[in-house]
Image (spheres, helix red, strand yellow):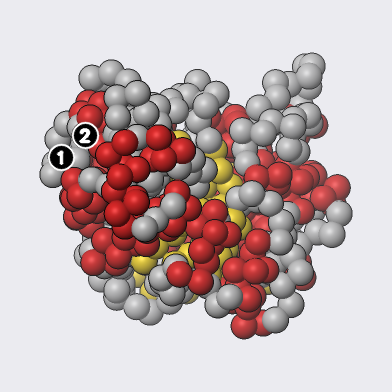
Amino acid sequence: MMKIIRTFSLVIFLGFITVVAVDGINLWPMPKSVSYGSLSLYLSKEFELRTDYKDASGILKEGFSRFLDVIESAHVVDGTVTGQAAALEGLHVVVSSSDDGLQFGIDESYKLSIPATRSPIYAHLEAQTVYGALHGLQTFSQLCHFNFTTRIIEVHRAPWVIIDQPRFSYRGLLIDTSRHYQPLPMIKNVIDAMAYTKLNVLHWHIVDTESFPLEIPSYPKLWNGAYSVSERYTTADAVEIVQYAQKRGINVLAEIDVPGHALSWGIGYPSLWPSLDCQQPLDVSNEFTFKVIDGILSDFSKVFKFRFVHLGGDEVDTSCWMVTPHVKKWLNKQGLNGSQAYEYFVLRAQKIALSHGYEIVNWEETFNNFGSKLSPKTVVHNWLGGGVAQKVVAAGLRCIVSNQDKWYLHYLDTSWQQFYMNEPLTNITNPKQQKLVIGGEVCMWGEHIDGSDIEQTIWPRAAAAAERLWTPFEKLAKDPKKVTGRLAHFRCLLNQRGVAAAPLAGPGRVAPDEPGSCYRQ
């Protein structure tokens, strides 16, 4: 039996009720099933974790420690309890599976019970996997409140019984480290906030036209395309990001966008360019191009253990191939025009990824141009607009929804209400086809985003989408006005936890309009 004890305090005063809610039950995202009572609990000086789970990787232990840290972060907990009180001794966690491997489609369900009586009194958390238990800890943390009179932590409205599981298995957030370098601590901050909102995939758009900041041991000159020597990620940095995310139940989807968006590759290896004057897409006629892609994906397979790799494939302008003599000569020899060469490149890159054990994600242009030719292991990433997901699943392929009109965070005029109401299954009524929509993703493109403004641009709008992806459809609000108070409360909770989430009132990344309460901004 593992026991982890933190000194601070949870005790119960039966029948004593403290006002807690700003707007009903302040949980975000809203769980599948919630029942509660009318009693208040207080945290005891030796609140402990009890479990028989063989926590070989320390995931549960570290998650419990973070739970304690986060509920104490907003204020100094230095009060004492006098009078008759029964202590809530701690949390008993039962995890059914000993497998702590994190992969797409794992069971993320949990059941959290916080009783108001019994002796000794323990909260109970049950989950099939340790990652479900982590979600349960996140929910538990939102039930904890600081009492300014007693200076201790309280849990209101006991007894609680919360049964929960996600609606979609893929709940993503894209960050872009090519347009602006994001320091490692900032990426970790984003991951922490993702865990608070139960998002579970960090889509790392690592490289693009502007810069190539990642070390690739197989081709060490690639990161010559970084903005500067200091704006780079070593292989060890990448491993650190993956492991940091994994301990919080978050997979990392790595992306190299080919054949377009790749000018930076040629800074270190100019032969990847069709010519010095025409530098992208990557040279389709050069075998070295595909050797480099193979080397990158070989190196990726040692670091990025997620089932999927993203190969991009969007916004490919083939005119450079058509005007470069040696490429044009190769195309004529192969009997290919520009669009056929684009297809050839994407499908060959897919085969390389498959050879390294990956399934593939490609942006929707690949499907729009040659969908029937894509590997059946392709997930089509919708971004251009509505209606594409319907066509993708009708063709039998899987889909991730990120339509830019609703789920692109750099569009500051897209309101949190639009993020909340964007439905991935719009006009998809066939149950088998609905299952092919594996989830959705909000995208934080980096043209105007660096470490100074990334958090307030992401949050709280990404949290609005997170509830859409987690909460059962029938429990989602049909009118976003009904969740305004609850989301405002969660935004203030993020602020209290050190996350620079912007006010709800106004467009994305808006500053407070005037002095006033956080809950009214």
Look at the picture and state if 51 lies above or below 146: below
Label whose residue precedes the other's in the sequence (2 or 1): 1
Residue at the disc numbered 2: 271
Q: Quadrant of residue 326?
A: top left
Q: Quadrant of residue 165?
A: bottom right
> What residue is rendered at 45% in x and 49% in y?
338
Residue 189: give its label.
Answer: none
Look at the picture and state if 157 lies above or below 23: below
> What residue is rendered at 71% in x and 56% in y?
386
Q: Amino acid at mark 2?
A: Ser
Residue at the disc numbered 1: 219
Kindly report the distance in space between the C-alpha atoms of the residues bearing marks 2 and 1. 13 Å
Please name whichever residue, 407 or 276, is drawn nearer the observer in this view of the structure.
276
The image shows residue 479 at horizontal and vertical percentages of: 86, 54
Please name whichever residue, 107 or 48, is drawn nearer the observer in this view of the structure.
107
Look at the picture and state if 366 lies above or below 322: below
Which quadrant: the C terminus? top right
The image shows residue 71 at horizontal and vertical percentages of: 51, 44
The image shows residue 515 at horizontal and vertical percentages of: 77, 17
> What residue is rendered at 34% in x and 78% in y?
97
Look at the picture and state if 13 lies above or below 52: above
Q: Quadrant of residue 3?
A: bottom left
Lateral position of residue 249 relative to residue 456, left or right: left
